[in-house]
Amino acid sequence: MTAQDSATRPNRIAVTTTAISQNGSRRSGTVMAALGVTAFSLTFPATAWGLEGIGPWSFVALRCVLSAVIAGGALLALRIPLPARRHWAGLAVVAAGVVVGFPLLTTLALQTSTTAHAAVVVGLLPLTTAVFSALRTGARPSRTFWTAALAGAAAVIAFTVQQSGGALSTADLYLFASLLICAAGYTEGGRLAREMPGWQVIGWALVGCLPLAVIGAAFALQHESFQLTGHSTAGLLYAAIGSQFLGLVVWYRGMAAIGVPKASQLQLAQPLLTLVWSVFLLGEHLTPAAPLTAAAVLVCIAVTQRARG
């Protein structure tokens, strides 16, 4: 071995170690994002259960209160300092998008829409999030990425149109509005998760909404029905803990590791998972188009995850 080989060997080892570490981080990030998608896929069935005994405004307010108390307790127990002032605007966007806006609009939609129909409409969220990410963070995914993403969105739209008979309802308008506001919250949360732990991003967003949620709950409970049954209790607890807090914790961590555009495309699987839950938990019936949509969407996920950003 020459002196030059001896000198370059440590550099090669360092490069190899860095590459292994980066690959491990990407794999871990993909797993985290996938866990988030799985948690989110149960949100609509849980909401449908909750609406069996709780009014929509009360459900959303109580969901926020419960998750904010848990998040605030964790932040207080670990003595996490207040976020830097430069993060406040971003946290406000996260709060408006994923803590208040998306839960409220989708809950209102589910008063008249089935979970299966709502799931396929919200299947457009990955593409919407990718667009917001490109505009907000300057991300420039490849043409292959965009082609696959658009193909996945087209499959979701076709499924939606087939299910709705080509007519848009008030519930659809709520759902389309929820796409825009949630995509903004996801994008901003993914950006913040690169500078602070993902659980703190959603934690501070929830705590910031607590005063408004308490006031909203107090007002809504006076004007809406409230009955705690087995389904409504389970739905509320899952929406608050499993979806609103724990799901977003792993989701933002995954986005920070693999990037917002790629993480968002994993959500193409979310409506299909929700369809499965709607059958087993709610007794809804799938149409013959569901397996075809599932195959198309899974192919698109594989392509987007391999495409270079």
Image (tube, rainbow, N blue to C red):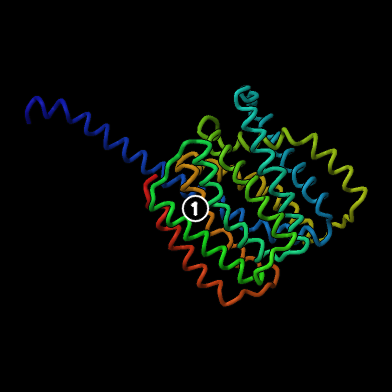
Foreground residue, 68 or 77? 68
Residue where numbered disc 1 is placed: 265
Depth check: 135 or 230 in front? 135
Pick out the residue farthest to the right. Answer: 222
Residue, x 79% and y 46% (percent of image)? Answer: 62
**Nearer to us in this view, 15 or 85:** 85
- 170 on left or right of 280: right
Q: Residue at x 71, y 49 (%)?
A: 103
Q: Point out residue 217 in the picture as x, y percentages from the top left corner.
A: 84, 44
User: Which quarter of the rendered picture does the C terminus lie within?
Assistant: top left
Q: Residue at x 10, y 26 (%)?
A: 4
Quick check: can you spot residue 280? no
**Residue 269 appears in the picture as rendered:** yes
Q: Quadrant of the N terminus?
A: top left
- Furthest-left residue in this view: 2
Quarter of the image for residue 86 reads top right
Location of residue 210 in the rendering, given as x and y in whole percent from the top left corner: 77, 36
Residue at position x 49%, y 52% in the image: 265
Name the secondary structure under disc 1. helix
What's the amino acid at mark 1?
Answer: Gln
Residue 176, position as x, y percentages in the image: 66, 54
Label total for image: 1
Specify few, some or many for label 1: CA neighbours under 10 Å numbering under 14, 14-19, or 20 or more.
many
Residue 213 x %, y %: 79, 40
222 over 208 or under it: above or below? below
